[in-house]
Image: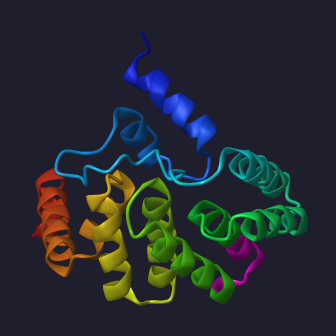
Amino acid sequence: MSSEHDRAVLQAIFNPSSPLGDAAAAAAGPAPGAATEELADDDRGFDAAPLAEVKALEARGVAAAEAGDLQAALHHFGRAVLILPQRPSAYNNRAQALRLQGNTAGALADLDLAISLSGGVGRTACQALVQRGLLLRLASRDEDAKADFDKAAALGSEFARQQAVALNPYAALCNRMLTEVIAKLRNPEASV
């Protein structure tokens, strides 16, 4: 029997694109109150042969991106999209490569497609929502980012939950006040 740590390590190996905080959560299953759909089963309804080919192309694309060859990664992800254009995973992966290449508009377009094709449920939707939330946050579109993080948190992403809390203005105010109180308690002479 494997431990939670072992499952988290395997999750990080087999899903290297997920935020680090989500590896343990994905290995342990959905968070309490999370949507009950099977998060790991984004491949229902696809024929086995083309699905296997697309998964192999995506694996090659991830390996190429990790090796720094973004052109090859984009080529592999593009071929995967051509074979199964209704499968959201390749769009999500291609968005990561586009983002690394500096093509934020292209990344956002692919993330929108991944979220739409997934129906906003499942592992790919969760990852795409987190990615899009991060890009929106970088663009100072905090309300839109928070909406994406809230949706991803509902799908079980602990990282998204933390980001949504950080974007809550009341939580930020409370955190700042708490930080000041703790600082005063640690160094009472400085507050005089």
Res. 183 image quadrant: bottom left
Can residue 126 be found in the magenta stretch?
no
- Where the N terminus falls, by quadrant? top left
Which residue does the image show at 52% across and 36% down from the upper left? Answer: 11
Q: Nearer the viewer, residue 57 or 67?
A: 57
Residue 85 pos. (x, y %): 67, 71
Magenta-tinted stretch? 97-104
What's the coloring here? rainbow
Q: Nearer the viewer, residue 146 or 172?
A: 146
Which residue does the image show at 38% across and 62% down from the upper left? Answer: 121
Can residue 98 be found in the magenta stretch?
yes
Which residue does the image show at 54% across and 71% down from the upper left? Answer: 114
Main SS of residues in magenta:
helix
Q: Nearer the viewer, residue 4 or 80?
A: 80
Q: Is residue 1 above or below residue 82?
A: above
Residue 135 pos. (x, y %): 52, 79
- Where the C terminus falls, by quadrant? bottom left
Residue 171 pos. (x, y %): 17, 71
Q: Is residue 120 left or right of residue 45?
A: left
Which residue does the image show at 44% across and 75% down from the upper left? Answer: 133
